[in-house]
Image (spheres, grey):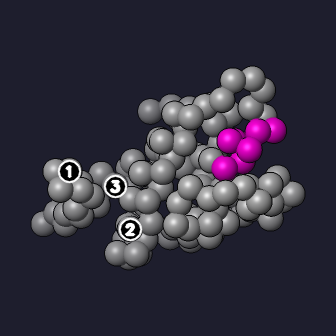
């Protein structure tokens, strides 16, 4: 039986859909994300005003925990965080600034959540 999670009043996704969307958006591995979260670049994001109710470092730490789990080990709380990531990343990606992005706060903010916009897209 499929378990359903309600994302809004009109959109309902299965856990499998949420998991797949999360894995498509999060293109950094747990080790790579962990290394970034404790870098000087990550600290630049911490100094910025926050757009969400969770700090970038905490979001990244929760993402790492999810990435290290097997699919069947994921909890309700894990799926709630995945939904938060799915809601946040596309909005932030859409705010792409002009110019060199390699050392931009925009990129570092996305990386704190597990998405490096400079990485090549995953091949499906």
Provide the residue designation for mark 1. 11
* Main SS class of the magenta portion in the image: helix
Q: Residue at x 69, y 23 (%)?
A: 98
Q: Is residue 45 visible to the viewer in this orientation of the structure?
A: yes
Mark found first going from the N terminus, 3 or 2? 3
- Residue 18 has which mark? 3
Work out whether residue 34 or residue 44 is closer to the camera in this orientation and state it. Answer: 44
Real-space Cα separation, disc 3 to disc 2, in angstroms = 9 Å
SS at mark 1?
loop
Mark found first going from the N terminus, 1 or 2? 1
Q: Which residues are magenta?
A: 103-109
Real-space Cα separation, disc 3 to disc 1, in angstroms = 12 Å
Where residue 35 sits in the image (x, y, percent)? 78, 60
120 within the magenta span: no
- Residue 121 has which mark? none
- Quarter of the image with the N terminus is bottom left
- Quarter of the image with the C terminus is top left
Marks 3,2: beta carbons within 8 A:
no
Place residue 49 in its image quadrant: bottom right
Provide the residue designation for mark 2. 80
Q: Residue at x 52, y 66 (%)?
A: 53
Crowding at dot 1, Cα within 10 Å, few <14 / some 14-19 / many 20+, comes out as: few
Q: Residue at x 54, y 42 (%)?
A: 92
106 within the magenta span: yes
């Amino acid at each position: 039986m499929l378990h359903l999670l309600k994302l809004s009043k009109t959109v309902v996704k299965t856990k499998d859909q949420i998991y797949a969307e999360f894995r498509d958006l999060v293109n950094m591995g747990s080790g790579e994300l962990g290394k970034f979260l404790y870098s000087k670049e990550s600290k630049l994001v911490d100094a910025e005003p926050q757009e969400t109710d969770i700090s970038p470092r905490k979001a990244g730490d929760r993402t790492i925990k999810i990435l290290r789990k097997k699919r069947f080990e994921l909890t309700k709380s894990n799926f709630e965080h995945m939904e938060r990531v799915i809601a946040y990343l596309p909005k932030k990606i859409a705010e792409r600034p002009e110019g060199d992005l390699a050392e931009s706060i925009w990129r570092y903010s996305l990386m704190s959540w597990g998405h490096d916009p400079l990485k090549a897209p995953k091949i499906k």
